[in-house]
Amino acid sequence: MLQNLYVKNLALIDEVEVDFGKGLNILTGETGAGKSIILGSVNLALGGRYSKEILRKDAAYGLVEITFSVENEEQRRQLEKMDIFPEEGCIVLSRRLMDGRSVSKINGETVTMSLLKEAAGILIDIHGQHEHQSLLYKKSQLQILDAFAGKPLEEIALRVKNAYKTYRSISEEWEKANLNESDRAKEIAFLEFEVNEIEGANLSDGEDEELESLYKRMTNAKNILENAVNAYGYTGGSSDCASDLISRAIRCMNDASRYDDRASQLLDQLSEIDGLLNDFNRELSDYQSSLEFSEEEFYLTEKRLNEINHLKTKYGNSIDLIMQYLEEKKERLCVLRDYDAYLESLEAKRIQAENELWKQSDQLSRLRKEQGAILAKKIEESLRDLNFVDVKFEIEFLKLNNYTAGGIDEVEFLISMNPGQPVKPLAEVASGGELSRTMLAIKSVMADRDHIETLIFDEIDVGISGRTAQKVAEKMALIGKNHQVICITHLAQIAAQANRHYVIEKTVTKDITRTGIRALSEEESVEELARILGGAVITETVRKSAREMKQLAKS
């Protein structure tokens, strides 16, 4: 549920904050007061486009922040899949708008625009003129039907999607497989060359690393040997070396040990050092010997390393990758050498995959048609509730000429609004106001199945009045029992149904124009209804009518 909206430095808004409640939240106000700015602010917070002109004059930035309480478990699960977790039961979406760029955040953490929009789609559903127009598209109509059918259809739709993925993969392989004899011979020759080149190298695991280490030692052997020789000279290869000096020290301590036990202990330590140094000198001598190699050894090492690096350049960055490449090409060679059997096997797989796809798609289509008949009847009943007295509503199914990941169905909503007229596509019949009422009818039917708690309606009252307006108001109140509904309206019939009523006002102070919003008390709500009903002059009779309208709505 949308709990709070905070807006700063946008258009005529200096700074406003408003708390919304459960049920039907109605926003009214004079023409030009800024109702569209309030709704536009919500759109901006949800990732809508903006231009720098939307920023208040001389403001460095604009800010929109909306807070949602998340009580629905399905919403919570969907958000957690996106690594978004409510904090104290709330999700805060915010967007800071600057000249040419914006920063979006969820619970204070900067996020991408795509993530913000995805999260918003779980939390809120906005219906303005653009959304009503989406009803005219067959794709949108199919989405409505699928949403109505719910989980049983989701399971079959997933099987169709997986079957389509398998079918397309095999079909693409089959389409690429039809090589002529000349092309097949060329590919066989090329693959044989690659396989022979890799196998002829007789590669072994870790060989490249060992060779690189050896080559590095060989290329630096002169410098290494010079330092090793000097080290040996200091420790054991000349007079006055460390080994010779330690031997002298041992003789001295040996004489001293005859007179004192402590000297004897020190002698033992010195003897141990002498033993360690002798061991070191022997290993250093062996190391010097290992650094001696012939020009032929260097040549062979360099040649082998170049051969391996050449194979790496062509077939993979490591010996493991080269060997994987080899296995793939050997498998491909087996296929090409017995190509007829391969094509026969591939065609059998393709036919099997197509049969499975058809089976799943047909099952999906049958379920859609069953649910479509139910949905059409419910929408027709809901439209009658909205004062479409002689309406007929049907859902027509057309079979696509090709398979898709969504099945083989195309649907079209058909409607007749006058007696004796045949049903026609919605796009050919419905006006803007009729579209908005049709969307409302659909939303009322979907209310029990829709996990999105907050619905915003704008321009729902376009082109209606009188009894029709009353019917629309009652339908919105009905939806408000299971959802939070926020609606901008110009009609008293709809405003009277409000569980919470807000007025949007424009004020001028010291030649500065500002738009604000505030919640109305019961009496203030009656006064606002009277303004809508009475226009320029509000009489006691008008006020009485407004009060009666409010009381009737409650009853």
Image: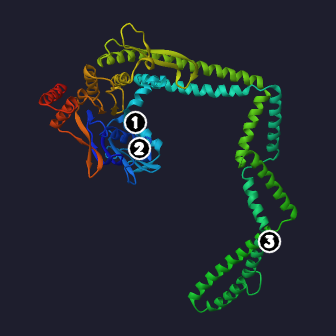
Which is nearer the N-term, disc 2 or disc 1?
2
Which is nearer the N-term, disc 3 or disc 2?
2
Could you tell me which secondary element the residue under label 3 belongs to?
helix
The CA span between labels 3 and 1 is 70 Å
Residue 441 vs residue 419, the one in the foreground: 419
Residue type for callout 1: Ile
Quadrant (top left, top right, bottom left, bottom right) of the N terminus: top left
Could you tell me which secondary element the residue under label 1 belongs to?
helix
From the image, state whether disc 3 or disc 2 is nearer to you.
2
Could you tell me which secondary element the residue under label 2 belongs to?
loop
The CA span between labels 3 and 2 is 61 Å
- Residue 316 versus residue 414 in the image, above or below: below
* Location of mark 3 (residue): 222
Residues at circles 2 and 1 in contact by the CB criterion of under 8 Å: no
* Location of mark 1 (residue): 122
Q: Which mark is residue 84?
A: 2
From the image, state whether disc 2 or disc 1 is nearer to you.
1
Residue 78 vs residue 336, the one in the foreground: 78
Residue 219 picture location, percent across and down: 79, 65
Residue 321 picture location, percent across and down: 70, 45
Are there few (<14), some (14-19), or many (20+) residues within 10 Å of tag 3?
A: few
Residue type for callout 2: Ile
Are there few (<14), some (14-19), or many (20+) residues within 10 Å of tag 1?
A: some
Quadrant (top left, top right, bottom left, bottom right) of the C terminus: top left
Query: Which residue is the extreme one toward the right?
Result: 296
